[in-house]
Image (tube, rainbow, N blue to C red):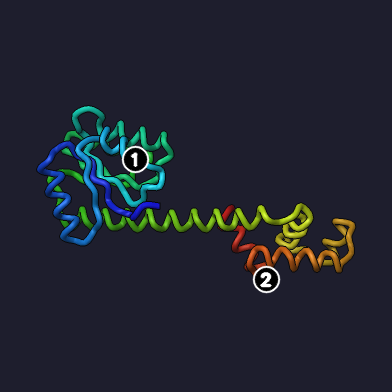
Amino acid sequence: MSEPKLHIVDDDEAIRDALGWLFQSRNVPAAVWPSAEAFLADYAPDLAGCLLLDIRMDGMSGLELFDRLRDLGCRMPVLFLTGHGDVPKAVSALKKGARDFVEKPFNDNDLVDRVIEALAFDADQREREAGQAGVAARLASLTQRERQVMDLVIAGKLNKVIADDLGISMRTVEVHRAHVFEKMGVKTAVELARLLAVVG
């Protein structure tokens, strides 16, 4: 994964320079692009952080870039820079999943705070997804019988009942249960239930 940073896309060179300086002065890593097309040319699925897009740009607009990125599976939080007349478009983008919009002229501190929140949100989201992938991999390592035993353990059934339900000995249930706990990295059924809640 690339280093998390703010990705600024704006076709106005003066605004790009001002934003770049603002975030650099606040120790927020940032990169700038002069157009939506330039950002798309450099886009990779492992880009991390958040996007600050101008709604109105020559060529592809910020809204069109947002739609294209969503089609590509990009889940980075997006904030829009908007003039007063673009507020309805920005609200429409929020309904499609954009995180926020900031009206020009903006308050520097407010903009930096919103970007920092978006960067933290992206980091949390990626950490959660990594955790889910880890749990899914552990689940995939279970045998079919271990999975059956696990489901009944989660349902709160005792070993004797599980043995009867599956037509196996209680000792075999205990062995499978121990393997499930070991593979899933838990010590109790409660921990197992909490872990499985992570992947829904």
Q: Image point 38% across, 42% down: which residue? A: 44
Residue at the image position 17 percent from the left and 51 percent from the top? 20
Q: Residue furthest top?
A: 59
Q: Are marks 1 and 2 in contact (CB under 8 Å)?
A: no
Q: Quadrant of residue 53?
A: top left
| Amino acid residing under circle 2 | Thr
- Kindly identify the residue that appears in the image at 27 percent across and 32 percent down: 37
| Mark 1–mark 2 distance (CA, rounded to whole Å) | 44 Å
Compared to 182, does 90 lie above or below?
Answer: above
| Crowd class of label 2 (few under 14; some 14 to 19; many from 20; radius 10 Å) | few
Mark 1 closeness class: few <14, some 14–19, many ≥20 residues within 10 Å:
few
- Which image quadrant is residue 198 in? bottom right
Residue 79 shows up from this direction: yes
Q: Secondary structure at mark 1?
A: loop
Q: Which residue is the site of mark 2?
A: 188
Residue highlighted by disc 1: 43
- How many dots with numbers? 2
Mark 1 or 2: the one toward you: 1
Q: Position of residue 41 (x, y in %)?
A: 31, 35
Dot placed on the residue nearer the N-terminal end, 1 or 2 = 1
Frontmost residue, 144 versus 100: 144
Pinpoint residue 2: horizontal percent, then vertical percent: 36, 52
Amino acid type assigned to the residue bearing label 1 in the image: Tyr
Q: Residue 191: give x, y in percent of width and height.
A: 63, 68
